[in-house]
Image (spheres, rainbow, N blue to C red):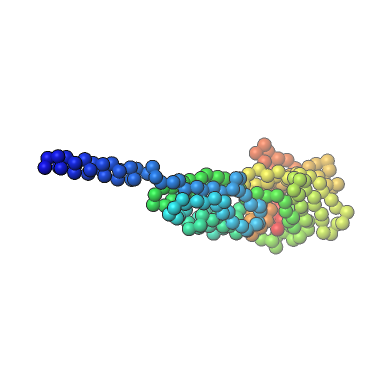
Amino acid sequence: MKKLMNNMLLSTLLLGLIGCNKDDGTDVLPIRLQYSDNPSTTYRTAGTLTPIIIDWNGEAGSFEVTTESEILRRDVMTFDSITGVFSWQNELPLGAWDFTVTARNSMTSASVMFTFKNEFVEGVFTGGFIENLEVDTTDQGNFPPAYTISLNEDKTITMTKFDDPTFSAVGEWRHRQGGSFNVEFITALSAPNIIYLDGFIYAGNPRFSGKYGNGINEDGTIKDPSGTFSFF
């Protein structure tokens, strides 16, 4: 009888050990999750970003952005917790955002980190200049279409004037950060003085607006601004 009790106790202990081995996670295969390297889009382009690899290795789960990102609190970008897909409208502002995405089921989880960028490559805008630093740059009526400015892919600029076919301007543009840009150019009328623009390129209500003058500070702002410009 005593031997039988000892055998039953030994069997119980063995079953308990086997149960522990099944529950310690050693048999759970990891989730495989990957997005494209250096994901990006360009100014005024709607689109989506989809995981290029998602292998649940068993039970399908859900996705979560586990870092704080203010861009997802706006109406221009969304994240689908079922598919892991980011979607954005053409109003997405220029800039860069860091994301950590976690895929999770009842057994395990996996996370990836990446930076998503909305970049400016080139654009054409029409508007003008006003010697007034307080004018509303969002009102297109304040800036009749006197000039067309082209910010070219090679970082050069060209400008034409509607009422003067002989007018021309040449120069360069520089992306500072986010939607901030500097432009410098010279015309036959302004030579030898360079004209500097310090402005912001907006995606919602698209325009290039800011201040202009004949000097620029080290931080890219205009020294003693002469007025305001806005191109739509």
Residue at 58% from the left image edge and 54% from the top image edge: 49
Tag count in the figure? 0
Residue at 82% from the left image edge and 48% from the top image edge: 169
Q: Is residue 223 visible?
A: no
Q: Is residue 163 visible?
A: yes
Q: Residue furthest right?
A: 166
The quadrant of the picture occupied by the C terminus is: bottom right
Residue at 57% from the left image edge and 45% from the top image edge: 115
Residue 139 coordinates in the image, percent (x, y): 66, 61
Please name whichever residue, 72 or 3, is drawn nearer the observer in this view of the structure: 3
Q: Residue furthest top?
A: 218
Residue 215 coordinates in the image, percent (x, y): 73, 40
Residue 23 coordinates in the image, percent (x, y): 33, 45
20 vs 189, left or right, is: left
Residue 125 coordinates in the image, percent (x, y): 73, 56
Residue at 56% from the left image edge and 54% from the top image edge: 50
Residue 39 lies, with reference to residue 77, above or below; the image says: above
2 vs 12, left or right, is: left
123 vs 89, left or right, is: right
On the image, which quarter does residue 2 sit in? Answer: top left
On the image, which quarter does residue 140 sit in? Answer: bottom right
Q: Residue furthest bottom?
A: 141
59 vs 181, left or right, is: left
The quadrant of the picture occupied by the N terminus is: top left
On the image, which quarter does residue 175 sit in? Answer: top right
